[in-house]
Amino acid sequence: MPPTQPWTDTEDDQLRNLHADGLSLTETAKRMHRSKSTVNRAARRLGLHWDRTKTAAATAAVIADGRTRRAALEQRFLDEAEKSLDRMWTGHEIGAFGGMDGEYKHAYVDEPSPADRKAIMQTAASASMAAAKLAEQNAGTEVDAAKGALTRLKVALETAINDD
């Protein structure tokens, strides 16, 4: 890896100007042909901070969308579990090819065989477990959101204290 060029006073000025123009860290780094970590380190040294409200809002929207999608999937898994369990005691037609002529034979049975009941129960259990896992994940995102709010509050309080 080639050695990086030392940071210059001219780059300090350029960084201040790009920051004042409202560019993001990513865009600033691109324009300065430096890595984001290098630019961020220089910005911290100069006391510059980026407004992250747009990022925070976009992140919150993605989290909310994910929560909604998981809730919908959770409901679908629960519906599937119920449908599977309803099949445990209902009659149905069975059929298979067989005999010397390879003829398709079918018959109606009053309820599933023990092997079919086992498969139905496994399907229902899998769907129920998937629903429970999705519910658990959604509960976790609420905890993460609370942690994020507390972190933002901490940063705001530290900034207010440092400004005084």
Image (tube, helix red, strand yellow):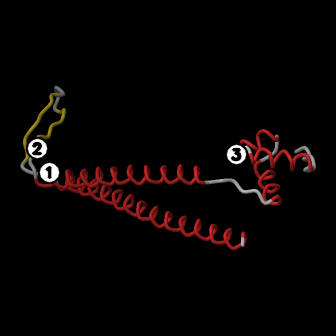
Disc 3 marks which residue? 22
Of tags 2 and 3, which is closer to the observer?
A: 3
Cα–Cα gap, marks 3 and 1: 67 Å
Disc 2 marks which residue? 92
Type of the residue with mark 2: His
Type of the residue with mark 1: Pro
Of tags 3 and 1, which is closer to the observer?
A: 3
First in sequence: mark 1 vs mark 2: 2
Residue depicted at 59% across the width and 65% down the height: 152
First in sequence: mark 3 vs mark 1: 3
In the rendered image, residue 56, in percent from the top left (x then y), is placed at 56, 54
In the rendered image, residue 72, in percent from the top left (x then y), is placed at 33, 50
**SS at badge 1:** loop
Cα–Cα gap, marks 2 and 3: 67 Å
Q: Give the quarter of the image for residue 107.
A: top left
Q: Is 101 placed left or right of 70 in the picture?
A: left
First in sequence: mark 2 vs mark 3: 3
Cα–Cα gap, marks 1 and 2: 8 Å
Q: Which mark is residue 45?
A: none
Q: Is 100 placed left or right of 69 in the picture?
A: left
Q: Nearer the viewer, residue 115 or 63?
A: 63
In the rendered image, residue 125, in percent from the top left (x then y), is placed at 29, 59
In the rendered image, residue 83, in percent from the top left (x then y), is placed at 19, 51
**SS at badge 2:** strand
Disc 1 marks which residue? 112
Type of the residue with mark 3: Gly
Whether pointer 1 and pointer 2 mark residues with C-beta atoms closer than 8 Å, the reply is yes
